Image (tube, rainbow, N blue to C red):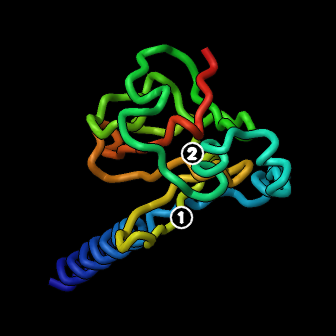
Amino acid sequence: MKFVSIFLILILFALLYNLISANKQSTCSCSKINSVNIMSEKIAKPDSEWKAQLSDEEYYVTRQKGTEKPFTGEYYNSKEKGVYKCKCCGNKLFSSDTKFDSGTGWPSFWNPFLKENIELHPDNSLGMKRIEVTCSKCGAHLGHVFNDGPPPTGLRYCINSLSLKLDK
């Protein structure tokens, strides 16, 4: 009887631990990134340099956290193969192999190229609770991630075309 009681207590602790861990991930959904690797690769430029490098629309989206209008971006309906890189710094962000048609009017992906190439941040702007996606190398605003995507991840990275450059 003692063995059964101890066994049940261990199972309850394991379930509680999994529940707490899952709750922490769903509350923040922010990735844990090795800051040592990221810090050595960070790009920091003054606004004047970003403005000189980017078009007005690209600057608005990537540096001021703007959003392009749906169904207007260069890549929302693209079927071309390649790697989608950050428009600002060239960091590899998404593969065309993970791109899908979400019907939202923005390029959508179910997985990043490498998880360490993006960062996730809580975004409570505009009266909504969302998770912002940024480039881990230069901090460019890319879009948002939602939990209504296809298998195998169930995620939809909804990304602005203006923040991307397709490397074919």
- Where is mark 1, residue-wise? 121
Q: Residue at x 67, y 36 (%)?
A: 87
Residue 115 shows which numbered tag?
Answer: 2
The x, y position of residue 126, in whole percent, is 40, 70
Q: Residue at x 45, y 71 (%)?
A: 125
The x, y position of residue 101, in whole percent, is 31, 29
Tag nearer the camera, 1 or 2: 1
Seen in the picture, residue 127 relative to 102 is either above or below; the reply is: below
The x, y position of residue 147, in whole percent, is 31, 52
Q: Which structural element holds mark 2?
A: helix
Quarter of the image for residue 128 reads bottom left
From the viewer's side, name the closer residue of 68 and 166: 68
Q: Which residue appears farthest toward the left when viewing the image?
A: 1
Q: Is residue 138 left or right of residue 134?
A: right
Seen in the picture, residue 101 relative to 120 is either above or below; the reply is: above
Q: Earlier in the sequence, mark 1 or mark 2?
A: 2
Q: Inspect the image, locate mark 2, and give the three-letter code of the amino acid beneath it.
A: Lys
Q: Residue at x 32, y 72 (%)?
A: 14
Q: Inspect the image, locate mark 1, and give the three-letter code of the amino acid beneath it.
A: His
Q: Is residue 118 left or right of residue 67?
A: right
